[in-house]
Amino acid sequence: MPTPLTDTQIADTLKHLPGWSHQNDRLTRGYKFADFSEAMGFMVRVGLLAEQHNHHPELFNVYSTVKISLNTHDADGKVTHKDVDLASAIQKLGE
């Protein structure tokens, strides 16, 4: 079972993940795109990354916005290195 990160570890991690925040035991981030097509393309790329990492986020889409939430179910819904690793990979997609 993955080990949950401490609040201090999460805060240190967020310094390297601009736009991400820690809320309700989740790493979260919103993205805004020009239109629905760009937003959906991004979601598909996130889905492919999730499969590569064998770790799956919650994705929410309304027209040109995408909201992502990450936590680890195997760690009682807390944030672990699995979430940080996937958030880092997603961050690179959004740049």
Image: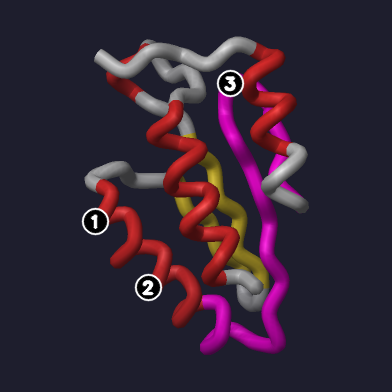
| Color encoding of the figure | secondary structure
User: Is 22 on the left-hand or right-hand side of 71?
Assistant: right
- The residue at 24%/56% (across/down) is 51
- The residue lying toward the viewer, choosing from 62 and 78, is 78
Dividing the picture into quarters, in which one does residue 73 lie?
A: top left
Q: Indicate which disc, 1 or 2, sits on the residue closer to the N terminus.
A: 2
Residue appearing at x 63%, y 19% in the figure: 9
Q: Position of residue 63 (x, y in %)?
A: 62, 76
In the rendered image, residue 46 lying in the magenta stretch gets the answer no
Q: Name the residue under label 2.
A: 44
Q: How crowded is mark 1: few (under 14 residues within 10 Å), some or many (20 or more)?
A: few
Disc 3 designates what residue? 25
Identify residue for label 1.
51
Disc on the earlier residue, 1 or 3: 3
> In the figure, is residue 95 to the left or right of 59?
right
Closer-to-camera residue (69/90): 90
